[in-house]
Image (tube, rainbow, N blue to C red):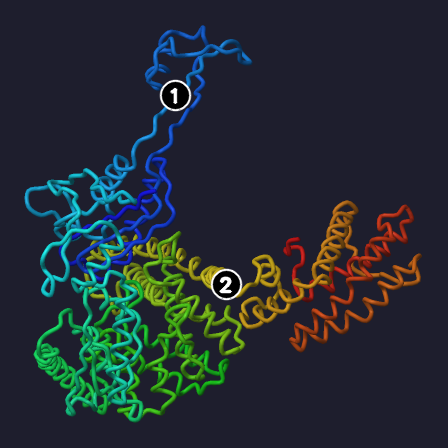
Amino acid sequence: MPDLLIELFSEEIPARMQARAREDLKKLVTDGLVNAGLTYASAGAFSTPRRLTLAVEGLTPNSPTTREERKGPRTDAPEAALEGFLRSTGLTRDQLVARDDKKGQVWFATIEKPGRPASEIVAEVLDATIRNFPWPKSMRWGAGSLRWVRPLHSIICLLSDESGATMVPLTVEGITAGNTTRGHRFLSPDAFTVTGFDDYAAKLRRAHVILDSHERDEAIRQHAANLAFARGWEIVPDDALLSEVAGLVEWPVPLMGVIEERFLDLPPEVLQTSMKEHQKFFSARNPKTGRIEGFVTVANIETPDDGATILAGNQRVLAARLSDAAFFWENDLREAKAGMSAWAEGLKSVTFHNKLGSQADRIDRIAALAREIAPLVCADADQAEQAARLAKLDLRSAMVGEFPELQGTMGRYYARAAGEPDAVADAARDHYSPLGPSDEVPTAPVSVAVALADKMDTLAGFWAIDGKPTGSKDPYALRRAALGVIRLLTSSMHRANLLPLLKIAVERQPDLPLLEATLATDVEARAEIAQRLSDPSYTGTILTGTREELEAQLNKLDADIASFSRVVEKYRALCSGAPSDLLSFLHDRLKIYLRDQGIRHDIIDAVLAQPGNDDLVLVVNRATALNAMMQTEDGKNLTQGLKRAGNILAQAEEKDGVEYSFGADVKFAETDQERALFAALDTAEPAIKAAIKAEDFPAAMTAIAALRAPIDAFFEAVQVNTDHQIVRRNRLNLLHRIRAAGQQIADFTKVEG
């Protein structure tokens, strides 16, 4: 079986596009081959800055011959129907066969498609792949119509087996596929021929090209670590930067430099961010001092002076960049020590959202909400409010203007420079966290209070203006904010009833108060004009005017008041329903969060159906305990018994039109199994109640699990709906006790299986 080698050689491919391009090339080609009838043993895709490569092993040499039988029209069908069938099959009438069918004789056609050689199929598939490749951005060049990420120079398309290599005949927009490629642009620029993938990879390495991006990753990682170790430093891990740099070089040559002494007092985050964003340098940290003291740059070429010239040029550029950073830092520190009042004033002119006011308005709301939340998370209310007022001031700093990713991080430095306590400064850094499912969650009480207030204000604001996410669209990252609220509460285990807090957060949003204030002003003005019209001697604040002018003003105000009243009522209704709707949204995110931790969706639903479901820590504790119980045999069987009791009781209550909720008496029990169930309930009910009150949910599960055997025995031995009405009623009331015992823990009707 032949192997296939494809290389698409071009100008430099952006590093951020290479991983996706590798996968796209592999999928498009292999799917196309399989759809055409070829099979293969394995396939691997590779990339460097100037090439995409695909190697397919064990390709079948031909597609198989296929036979398809197709049913046509009846033999007595109109001639037009038969002609259409013949056109669709490509056959003639004498090639059809008439057979008996349920409704008479029907024409059948046997269509045979001969197999095709692999080279022909590969040419078609690769041509379509190149012309329809899904680059995020592409370009045209010259006079051709082909679009590629950068100008495409050459194509390799080889089929090779024991007898040798064969070039697949293919031409795309004047580029004819061959067996020739080039190595490193500067170190080995000459063209060379290849005979297969092994020969191709070996010759590329001799031509100073490492084909595998993962191998380039590891080479950079190891060499940089060795350079740092020789100086007693360590490389600051950055997998994203490593992947990007590996996509910029074909022959990585790491070089280590030293940061000038005058820049070492800059915050390490500033040094690291400046070097990463501007020059793609890895930071080297001195573990003894904790400072960033050096860097590693990765060249794409070996030089006679071992990179000294490259390193000197990089250090000159770095000095200029860090001089800018030092200038920003010094100016920002002066403003921070002066109290940051200019930054606070500047945020009044920065719009957060046209319906939600400025950043300064938002800070006021977050500060007030943080004060409400603080006692619930054991934080000092004054510190929480102060932290909320300072946390976003760094948005106006020069450093964050240059490096937006440092927001929060710089806020901590500036808060410390302003003389704020560590708890306040740390909250400025941490209040954006967690940003994603794997991000670290702050645990300091003040940080938790401000982070919760920030995220809850965001959610409440967009719910108040009906801006919640729809389908896959979430432009304001509200799902991420909801997950942040969940993780903050469940990680810190702080108890909080969210519904009252969400109500406060919604009511403080600006739209409704502004509309109500405008409406009140118009109503007051209308009353004054009406007074003046009825009493010419009345003296008020309305300017004088003719009667006609006053009547015109009155008519306009009537129209405005009617319009504003409708808008205000709409927003009142929206804000009234927003807290509960927002809680449901949080529940939906909580379900996903808990499912990722192995808790079944039906168990989560059963717990959410209980009172107190706005306390997410309580919900998680209940769900965790119930999930553990449901993994035992007792738990599974108990659920069936509880559901059976609930179903029988519900049917009887519906049929009889009464509620069986009291009066079960052991003296009416006729069997030992009934009496045993009474005894078991007498023991379990107070134990469950005490455990629930103490929120010891594992103990509650243990107590209710003890009912499994008595319930099973009861249903095995007893007919609930007996003809004896007193006994029947007593047994139904007993079922109510079973159902009530389960309802203390969860709604077991929602538990599946």
Q: Badge 1 is on which residue?
A: 111
Residue sticking out furthest to the front: 163
429 vs 701: above or below: below
224 vs 586: above or below: below
Describe residue 723's horizontal placement relative to residue 245 as left or right.
Answer: right
Of 677 and 125, which appears nearest the observer? Answer: 125
- Pointer 2: residues within 10 angstroms few (<14), some, or many (20+)? few
Of 672 and 79, which appears nearest the observer? Answer: 79
* Residue shown at 37% from the left, 65% from the top: 461
Give residue 258's quadrant in the image. bottom left
SS of the residue at dot 2?
Answer: loop
- Pointer 1: residues within 10 angstroms few (<14), some, or many (20+)? some
For the residues labelled 2 and 1, say whether their Cβ atoms are less than 8 Å apart: no
* Residue shown at 43% from the left, 13% from the top: 73
749 vs 324: above or below: above
Give residue 118's quadrant in the image. top left
Frontmost of labels 2 and 1 is 1
Kind of residue sitting beneath label 2: Asp
SS of the residue at dot 1?
Answer: strand
Q: Badge 2 is on which residue?
A: 596
Relative image position of residue 210 (x, y in whole percent): 23, 63
